[in-house]
Amino acid sequence: MLCVFCLRVFNQPANHLPNGKWSAQVDWTISLFAVRLYDDCVSCQAIVRGLRGVELPLGDDTTVAIRAIFFSPRTHGGCIECMPYATFTVSDAATKRRLCGTQILLEQVGDKGDAVLLRKVHGTTTGSPEALSFIKNNLQTCLDSHEACRAASARTSWYPTRLIRVDGSHAQLVITAETPPDGPYASLSHRWGGADIIKCTQKTLPELKKGLPSSSLPATFRDALGAIRFLGIGYIWIDSLCIVQDSASDWAAESKTMLGVYRHSVVNLAATCSRDSHSGLFSTRAPRGLHSGPFAASNGAVSGSFVAVEAALDADSWTAAVENAPLNARAWVLQERLLSPRVAHFARAQVLWDCPGLAAAETLPSGARAMPHLFRRGVGRKRGSNLLHVPAEPDRALGQWAAIVDAYSRCGLTFASDRVVAISGVVEHLRARSADRRFFCGLWRPRMEMQLCWLAAGPGAAGRYGWLPSWSWMSVDGAVDAPRPDAFEGYVVTLFAEVRDVVVEADGGGHLRLRCVTRPVGIETRPSLRLVGAGMDEFRSLALDVASPPGLKGRLFFVPVFGVQEPAAVSTDRAFECRGLLLEQVDKSEGLYERRGHVFILAKSDSVSGTSQEITIA
């Protein structure tokens, strides 16, 4: 249903525009307690789910301002592109800060109230036969008719070293070289969450090979086994059970097979809203809060009986349900999502299907969206995604890599030593499709100079991984924003530095030789953080790599790396945007430097000119 507050926007007189479109708007303030109380209102419950991703403490007594706007259907080329929809934007009433948003899709229905595109769900859990049938039907359709999906997951006889075989109520670890599987396998993405769970160790390996009752496994594993039984899949790959966890050699060998493990799985089951292995794959839900049932709407532009559901596949709702979910805060899961040809996200309210041919939800099996051209930061849906494709133009390829870097760096790792290997499957996939396969600790060799100009997001990272080179974004423990060369299309980009050589060692350490101009600078912290020195008159920003760096004992230098100008300004003396590095000289005799931050200035030619020299950055 829809509550009395949310229902008003659908009966508010429409404001007609000259182009034939219309909209209607309603604003109100309400306590979060009241919003949460309407547990059978489609839009209120979508708002509650959206607020879970807000980092601010929000109590029941918090007053929020809600703006609802009901829009006419979008058209493109004279054709209706999507159904009527409404947006709900939620802000803190006191500070006016936007907290979250959601969209609601509407479909007009006849006397019987039967919708064609919006589906009512009845199961009270995401593990109900209804929800699992949704996965099964989409999987079969995908295998039968999605050309893009078949190309992405061409079947071969390749199998992981070990798989869990499901036999009735028992689970058995099989060595695939000894007992070849006779069908496809699924994979499971889950959070260990520090939970004390059964693992494959040198001690438990014999027991797992004999088999054990499914009932002895953690809830998430039990649910996953039940799901693949329903889907008719006999095998599943679960990291904690298929890698010998106390064997460094086995872990090292198996971690190199992640591309194959996920690329060849027929479907990935994602425990999206689960915080640990005991929380389960499935969630309980209230179906009445997912579908409005028929209601009357009349605003002078439309009139009749409608049903409504959350636009679960649109950017706001997808971000709340998937991108901001507990599972996707785990760095390893990024490549599991990217590499798997199909993912079934077991979100809090419903199952979401994601493959290159279709993104769908239980309530939206057709894949309908309110605003199909709006995207948010994150991995996003597979349909229309180019993240695993390598364009011929290097700048576009690096722009896509930057999106992966941004998402990966915002995820967490239990073990810092996994920083490089947890994304290695994606790197292996991209290298196989790249003309220039040289890759150095997070940076590709083409246009490497520009890639050096990543910057720590926000106030800087929590710390630094000392065994990784300081010039790599992988060396900081925190979110980074990677440069996107494709964003400068149409502008003139001038390089002021040149990477001459790069050496990366087996343990992750390494250095590069950079031919560049080094300009001495100092740091002032008051009234704000800034650099001082020659060429710093038009200083704009300094982003330190680490939020609270140790005292900088060596001399500091600004190294201009590249500038961006409008074509018409190239022959003039107008200032241009220049990005570069803040380096600390750590060994003068060896000419050795380490990176300390990213610098942005407005420069003129004399700000970046000087005698070039070759330096080593560790």
Image: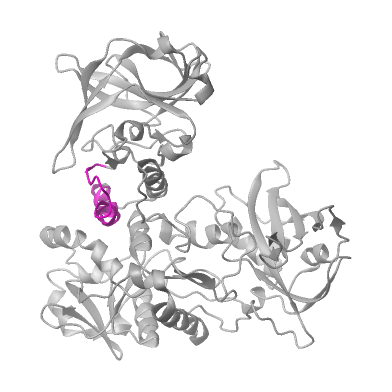
Residue 195 seen from this side: yes
Q: Which residue is at a point 42% across and 55% down the rendered structure image?
A: 386
Quarter of the rendering containing residue 318: bottom right
Identity of the residue drawn at 33% across and 12% down:
519
Asked if the stretch drawn in magenta spans residue 424, the answer is yes
The residue closer to the viewer here, 85 or 202, is 85
Q: How many marks?
A: 0
The span shown in magenta is: 417-441
Residue 217 highlighted magenta (yes or no): no
Of 582 and 282, nearer the camera is 582
In this picture the colour scheme is: one colour
In the drawing, does residue 329 fall left or right of residue 437? right
The x, y position of residue 12, in whole percent, is: 86, 62
Camera sees residue 62: no
Left or right: where 559 falls relative to 55: left
Q: Left of 95 or right of it: where is 577?
A: left
> In this rendering, is residue 318 above or below 131?
above
Q: Where's residue 441, x and y in %? A: 25, 42
Q: Quadrant of the N terminus?
A: bottom right
Q: Is residue 256 left or right of residue 600?
A: left
The answer to which quarter of the image holds residue 515 is top left
Quadrant position of the C terminus in the picture: top left
Figure check: 63 above or below 193: above
Q: Residue furthest bottom?
A: 168
Q: At 71% from the left edge and 42% from the top edge, which residue is drawn?
A: 96
Which residue is depicted at the point 33% across and 32% down? 452
Q: Position of residue 204 (x, y in %)?
A: 16, 74
Question: Looking at the picture, how far across and down is residue 435, in whole percent?
Answer: 25, 48
